[in-house]
Image (cartoon, helix red, strand yellow):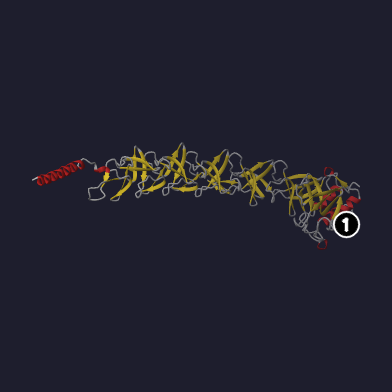
Amino acid sequence: MCKKNNKRKIYLSLFLVMALFSVGFSNVNYSSYAERSTTLTKKKYSGFVKKSGKIYYYSPKTGKKLKGLRTIQGKKYYFSKSSGEALTGLRTVDRKKYYFSKSSGEALTGLKTVDRKKYYFSKSSGQALTGLRTIGGKKYYFSKSSYQALTGFRTVDRKKYYFSKSSGEAYTGLKNIEGKKYCFSTSSYEVLTGLKTIDGKKYYFSKSSGEALTGLRTIDGKKYYFSKSSGEALTGLRTIDGKKYYFSKSSGEALTGLRTIDGKKYYFLKSSHQALKGLRTIGGEKYYFDTSTCEAINGFKKTDGNTYYFSDKDFNALRGLQSFDKDLYYFNESTFAMTTNKTITYCNINFTFGSNGVANSMKIKSGFENDKRTNLLYNGFSKLGLPYGSTADGLLRCNTFAAYCYNSIGYTGLNNLRSDNQAKYVLAQGGEITASQLKPGDLIFFNIENSPYCDNNGDNDTCSRNEVIDDIKYHVHHVSIYLGNGKTIDTSSSAGHVKVRDLDIDTTSTAYYPVLYGNLLDK
């Protein structure tokens, strides 16, 4: 009887224990624990746990899942407020944007491309940054609302930038955008304005839009011309709207004044920079610029009722006595107009010019019939147009022409002498004078450096035509006869015949210049 009662007591005790055990487990929060087995044993989790491909984090202290934005071991994570799972991808947390790794769940930093759009996440906070940012030496601009890298033209703090539509990077250098040219600073990335030199070429960028401007532009009082296709400043001679301009090859600026371009002369006004046309007086000289090409012409030109002759070399109108082949003309000293139907006295000789401007007669002025200087020149004028050459052929060279003129008045000292020996003769006779002492009929000897006619084609020490004048050794290769009023008469191989020339005593030429003036007629 006692044994049966004991068994009942044991069964009852076991039943009560199991009942209590069951009641106790019914009050456990499973959200804080993970089932490891189907046994009655339960284990508390701590740290990161991955279940069914999802990541959770359990507090080491409480064993509970963490939720919301958390920093764990220096890295940020964002756990669902409902399930506690780590959320990934782009997330907005407290109005701030983050980007969480799909594999690790941690917040990524730096420049990231998400759904083909760029973002920049702070390396310290992980938050998406906005505004203008320099990343890896390249500049980007991130939206304050969407956090995305913006593209195209953007104005930031009154400065203009352009961000690539593909990479989001700010442009630098010269760029074509939608058919227009811009230039962006290589240091600040902002669009440049004003006149700029890029790779040796000039461009002009609008101060308002930044685009390269084209056509004719005045910048700081200087005129430029920019190509409509490339935008670069064009140089050289240009015709714009029927008017000619000349732009410097070095600076691109429109030049003014008298200019020689490819052997042709032009004059560009200081005010408009345009090339002049027609008859113009410039610096005391007269020029005629073709009405279509604007080029200064040479030769004869009739305009405004007068005829002029423009120099073959410098294109300026000639004045005074001039000869062309055997014909002699006279151009007014002040107006430059050709004299017609009039008699002019020159060197005591009366020249009568016909309707065509050519001197058709010359006669020694009354009272000077026996004047040796007048007769010497009269005889020289009679040889105008005679070809240059040997006396054996009835022709004359510079030295034989001088000898002929002096012979015509009975002076034979220059006969059979080269021009250098004639210079030596003048010195021996004590005939050296200064340029200011020159009279019509006096002699002028010229030095020619590196002359092709030099007997030895050598330097000053080997040329046989060397002559020491005023303690200086010269090459004397030419002689002329002075007419007065800045004119000479002579012949040369370059001219090809006897002709009247303009004399430039103050020549700056280093190859051809007068070195000796001689008066033999007053000895």
- Give whichever of 404, 359 is nearer the camera: 404
Mark 1 sits on what residue? Answer: 415
Q: Looking at the image, can residue 402 be seen?
A: yes
Closer to us: 443 or 193: 193
Residue 62 in the image, given as x and y percentages of width and height: 31, 40
Residue ranking furthest to the bottom: 392
- Can you give x and y, in whole percent of width and height, for residue 304 in the image? 63, 43
Between 181 and 229, the one lying in front of the other is 181
Instruction: Tell me if 341 is positioned left or right of 435 in this view.
Output: left
Residue type pointed to by label 1: Asn
Please tell me whether mark 1 sits on a helix, a strand or a loop: loop
Identity of the residue furthest to the left in this view: 1
Q: Residues within 10 Å of mark 1 (few under 14, many from 20)?
A: some
Confirm whether residue 408 shows in the render. Answer: no
In the visual, does 294 lie left or right of 187?
right
Residue nearest the observer in this picture, 109 or 138: 109
Location of residue 319 in the rendering, given as x and y in whole percent from the top left corner: 72, 45
User: In x, y percent, where is residue 477?
Assistant: 81, 55
Spot the residue most to the front: 2
Question: Which quadrant would the N terminus be assigned to in this image?
Answer: top left
Who's the residue at 67% across and 48% down the image? 315
